Image (cartoon, helix red, strand yellow):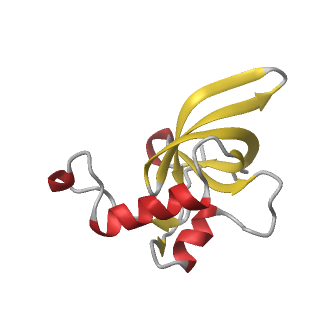
Amino acid sequence: MFEPFVYRGRLVEWRYAGNCRVDLDLGFGVALPGKIVDLAGVHCPFPSEEEGAIPSGAHGAALDFSNQFMPPGSKVILKVSRGAGNRWLAEIALAGNTVAGTVNEALVRAGHATRDEPERHDD
């Protein structure tokens, strides 16, 4: 069974409510800048083609929530596993803030996401 890894990092940007770019610290002086990560265990609204570059509707509200809960530049802790196609799936929490929980759970509690079965692939 593939066990998740825990990394520290800095949130660069939210691409949409369930997908972000993170600068990761892999330890031992090794960094992985700009890694794209999907939120594990949740399904968030995805931008439609009609929206273009300006988020609106359910997607816009969920993206605004993600940006407010965990603004770009935040120090974060990621519990990472691997999904289909070697996508990185993560539960993401603010570093040093155990009270707020993960952005994954916060999106579900606020009604901006639904729970989803995690995609795990053991090789």
The quadrant holding residue 63 is bottom left
As drawn, is 46 to the left or to the right of 122? left
In this rendering, does residue 29 appear at all? yes
**Please, is residue 116 above or below residue 94 in the view?**
below
Residue 110 lies, in percent from the top left, at 52, 78
In this rendering, does residue 119 appear at all? no
As drawn, is 83 to the left or to the right of 103? left
Task: State the residue in front, 78 or 81.
Answer: 78
Q: Write the residue at 52% across / 55% down.
A: 67
**Please, is residue 51 above or below residue 100 in the view?**
above
Residue 57 lies, in percent from the top left, at 28, 68
- Which quarter of the rendering shows the C terminus? top right
The quadrant holding residue 32 is top right
Q: Of all residues shown, which one is farthest toward the left?
A: 50
**Please, is residue 69 above or below residue 26 in the view?**
below
Task: State the residue in front, 120 or 7.
Answer: 7
Task: State the residue in front, 118 or 103.
Answer: 103
Residue 12 lies, in percent from the top left, at 56, 37
Q: Write the residue at 81% across / 20% down.
A: 29
Residue 3 lies, in percent from the top left, at 73, 51
Q: Write the residue at 55% across / 60% down.
A: 68
**Please, is residue 102 above or below residue 85 in the view?**
below
Say how many tags the image has: 0
